[in-house]
Image (cartoon, rainbow, N blue to C red):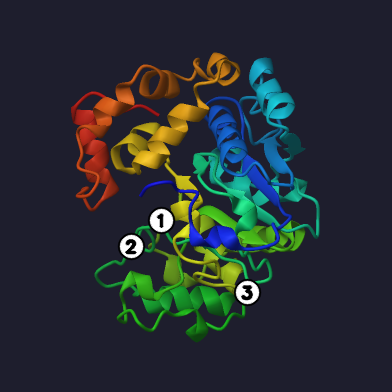
Amino acid sequence: MGNLRDAAADTADPPRHFNIFIVAQEGRLAHEAALFAASLRESDPGFTGKLIIGEPQPGPLWPDDPRIRNADLRALLTDHFGAEIRPFESHHFGAGYPNGNKIEGLSCLPAGEPFVFFDSDTLITGPLSRLPFDFNRPSASMRREGTWPRIELYGPGYTEIWKSLHDRFGLDFASSLDLSQPDEYWQRYLYFNAGWFFHSDPAAFGARFLDYALTIRDDPPRELVCQQMFPWLDQVALPLVVHSFGGGRHTLPQGTLDGSHSCHYRMLPLLYARESDAVVDLVERIAAPNRVKKVLKDWKPLRKMVLHGQGRKVRALFDQDDLPRREQAIRNRIRKNGFWMR
C-alpha cells in the first residue's frame, strides 16, 4: 500500500476541528489506548481537537474496579500524549456488556462539539484532521462481515427483521436499503461495524443510541425472538441511529477510515497477519521510543509480537495478497502455530 499518509483525501482544507473519543480501562484496553495515542501523534501532528479517553467508574455493574490503575500508563496518556481521561458511570451495561461503554461513554464528551469515536484497538495511519467529515451526515465502519442477524430455516428473513426495527423507531426502511445488492442478501441492509462512527453532537447521538439499544435489549420486536443479541447489540442499534440522523453508508470518502487513515487491527496477531507493510512499520516505530516501550512492555502481546519480533513470524505464515476470506481461518492458523494471544 506504500505510505498511508499520501492519500488524496489529505488535500481537504482547512483542517477540521473535532474531538476523538476512545474508551479505556484497566488491562488490555489501556495499553491499546496508548498505542492509539502514539499513532495519532505520529500520523496527524496537526490535530487540534481533544483526544478524550472515557473511563468507566466503579459501581454495581462492575465486579472489579475498571479504572486504569497503572500510574505510569496514565501519565503516558495524559502528560506525554496530552489525552484527557474523563470518567463516566455505567448505569445500564457494565461488565455484562462492555461494548455498552461506547454508548454510555458518549455522556462524558462536550455536548455540541463534533466527535469521531474509535475502538481502542485502532491505529491512526493518516491525518484525520484533513478528512472531509460531514458531521451532520453520520456514518460508521463498513469493514464488517454478515454477523447479524442469523437467519433460521423457518424464521423471518433479513427484510422482516430489519423492517421491524425500523418500524419500531419510526424510520423509513426503504431508504436504508442498498438496491444494488440482491433481496435477502445481508449487504442490502444497513449494517456497520461499530469500530468507528461520527456525528456533530455526542449528547444527541449518545442519548438516541442508548434509547435504541435499551429498547432492542428489553423490548425487541417479535421478529427478533430467535436472534442472539450478545455481542451484537451495539451493531444492531448503530445503523438505526445513523439512519435516524440522516446519515448512511460512505458519507466519508471510501478508502480513508479503514484504509489510508485508520486501521482497526482488532488484535496484534491479526495486525501482523493481514495488514499492510506500512501499518506493521507504523506499530513498530511508535512502540520503539523508550518512554513508550518502558510502559507498554508489560503488555504481553506487544512485548512478544512487536518488541520481540514474534509478529514477523506470524506475518510469514500468510500471503497478504491472498489471505483466507474469513477471519476465523486466519485465527485458526495463528493458533495452530502457537502464536495466538490477546
Residue drawn 65% across the image and 41% down it: 45
| Secondary structure of the residue carrying numbered label 3 | helix
Q: CA distance from mark 3 to mark 1?
A: 24 Å
In the image shown, does 180 or 284 lie closer to the viewer? 284
Q: Earlier in the sequence, mark 2 or mark 1?
A: 2
Residue with the mark numbered 3: 244
Name the residue type under label 3. Answer: Ser
Residue with the mark numbered 2: 150
Q: Earlier in the sequence, mark 3 or mark 1?
A: 1
In the rendered image, which quarter is residue 53 located in? top right
Residue drawn 55% across the image and 53% down it: 196
Which of labels 3 and 2 is toward the front? 3
Residue with the mark numbered 1: 228
Residue drawn 22% across the image and 44% down it: 329
Residue drawn 66% across the image and 19% down it: 69
Q: Earlier in the sequence, mark 3 or mark 2?
A: 2
- Measuring from the top left, give residue 215's x and y in whole percent: 61, 63
